[in-house]
Image: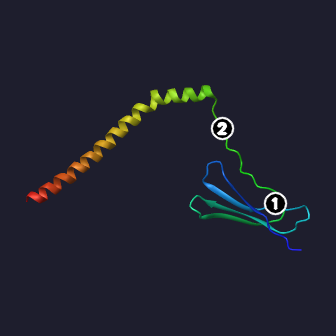
Amino acid sequence: MVQETKFDCAWDQTGRYLAVYGEKRSPLDKTDKSIKFFNIFGEQIAVYENLQNLLQFRWRPRPTGLLSAKELAKAKQEYKTKYNKLFKEEEKSEKKQIASKKQDAKKSVRDEFLS
């Protein structure tokens, strides 16, 4: 009697990781099972072998949210009042620096061409 190994796979909730695993076919099945984890690029991340009592594999559910709706609304409001201005100023200064670097590069090319 030839016994087939049953392999199955499961994507996580984010779609970033794939688990390929062998399941126990019956209570009398004594073969060792394994789990292999892959990322979205097909690269193997981890391997767990010699798992004798692997009956099933399920991804751990992700929490829907750690904050209540009221706390989330409060955090959004605080962001608008506290951090929005700070981040906008920081973004403006970064854009000015990039623009000045581009302008300096153009000026050096023009000066080089004219001389």
- Amino acid tagged 1: Leu
Residue at 56% over, 27% down: 73
| Label 2 element class | loop
- Amino acid tagged 2: Thr
Q: In the figure, residue 32 lies in which quadrant?
A: bottom right
The residue lying toward the viewer, choosing from 4 and 33, is 4
- Residue 41 in the image: state x and y as whole percent: 56, 61
- Residue 99 in the image: state x and y as whole percent: 26, 45
Q: Earlier in the sequence, mark 1 or mark 2?
A: 1
Q: Is residue 93 left or right of residue 12?
A: left
Callout 1 crowding tier (Cα within 10 Å): few <14, some 14–19, many ≥20: some
Quadrant location, the N terminus? bottom right
Rendered image: mark on residue 54? 1
Q: CA distance from mark 1 to mark 2?
A: 28 Å
Quadrant location, the C terminus? bottom left
Residue at the bottom extreme of this rendering: 1
Rendered image: mark on residue 33? none
Q: Is residue 115 left or right of residue 74?
A: left
Q: Which residue is identified by label 2?
A: 64
Q: Is residue 89 left or right of residue 53?
A: left
- Residue 38 in the image: state x and y as whole percent: 63, 61
Residue at the right extreme of this rendering: 28
The residue lying toward the viewer, choosing from 8 and 88, is 8
The residue lying toward the viewer, choosing from 88 and 22, is 22
